[in-house]
Image: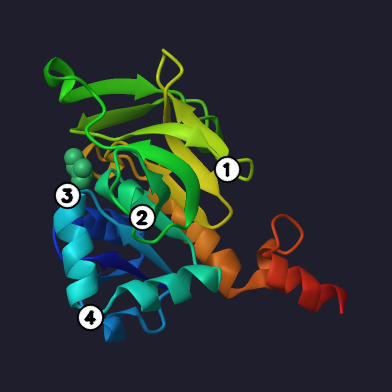
Amino acid sequence: MRIGVLAVQGAFVEHARMLRAIGVEPVDVRLPADLVGLAGLILPGGESTAMRRLVDRWGLRAPILDLARGGAPILGTCAGMILLAADIADGDPPVFGLLDVTVRRNAFGRQLDSFEADIAVPILGDSPVHGIFIRAPIVERVGPGVAVVACLDDGRVVAVRERNILATAFHPELAGEMRFHRLLATMAAEHADPGEGAGRRPHPTRRSVASA
Ligand code: GLN
């Protein structure tokens, strides 16, 4: 299985390393042609303003939207979460708008610009995730179709999932945390071979085919 990592800017090398560690072939995505045949995609952390510009400069916006709308799973971390959000507080226009949340960039005060925290992530099992937050965004509003995947102790939302779209405000790839990548690979396998996952979480287009 091949999963892409948007490689225009930011922490893409670490994500590729994580994919290799779980037996998935990573593909650096810089041009639309790199997206062909991918089972899923990771949007890494970095600087979302720079990433937004480069996504448009290289013509990646429409083909990434096509991939996501076709049901391929997408994982966005930190700046990647910002790129996925339907709404960015303080006025930046959305980039992909695939995730019905409002995010606020650089949401933690100066002292907390960067911090680490252990976070419970029930969908990944009992042991907590070590979250590394680097000038991280926060999720301020969660739409009705969006599941909260993780919160800080004070209740602020830092990971969410909406169908095939998964996003974290922190950087699992910098903490050696492989469970998000494994979940993405599982979602990608189910998307590629709906027979396997059909009983559990069929994509709506598959469901209509199955019931036809
Ligand atoms: N602060 C960055 C932004 O707004 C995100 C930081 C990160 O990805 N580590 O784009």
Q: CA distance from mark 3 to mark 1?
A: 24 Å
Mark 2, other Cα within 10 Å: few <14 / some 14–19 / many ≥20: some
Q: Earlier in the sequence, mark 1 or mark 2?
A: 2
Amino acid at the residue labelled 4: Leu
Image quadrant assignment for residue 191: bottom right
What residue is rendered at 19% in x and 22% in y?
115
Q: Which residue is mark 4?
A: 31
- Nearer the observer: mark 3 or 2; the answer is 2
Instruction: Please state which of residues 177 and 69 is positioned toward the viewer in this rendering.
Output: 69
SS at badge 1: loop
Is 82 positioned to the left or the right of 184 in the image? left
Amino acid at the residue labelled 3: Gly
Q: For the residue with label 3, is its CB less than 8 Å from the closest atom of ligand 1?
A: yes
Mark 3, other Cα within 10 Å: few <14 / some 14–19 / many ≥20: many
Residue at the outermost front position: 91
Mark 1, other Cα within 10 Å: few <14 / some 14–19 / many ≥20: some
Please report contact status of discs 3 and 1: CB closer than 8 Å, yes or no: no
Q: Which residue is mark 2?
A: 94
Which quarter holds ligand 1?
top left
Image quadrant assignment for residue 7: bottom left
Please identify the quadrant where the C terminus is shown: bottom right
Amino acid at the residue labelled 2: Pro
Q: CA distance from mark 3 to mark 2?
A: 16 Å
Is 55 positioned to the left or the right of 196 in the image? left
Q: Which residue is mark 3?
A: 46
What residue is rendered at 41% in x and 34% in y?
139
Instruction: Please state which of residues 168 and 179 is positioned toward the viewer in this rendering.
Output: 168
Q: Earlier in the sequence, mark 3 or mark 2?
A: 3
Give percent across and percent down for residue 175.
24, 36
Please report contact status of discs 2 and 4: CB closer than 8 Å, yes or no: no
What residue is rendered at 46% in x and 76% in y?
66
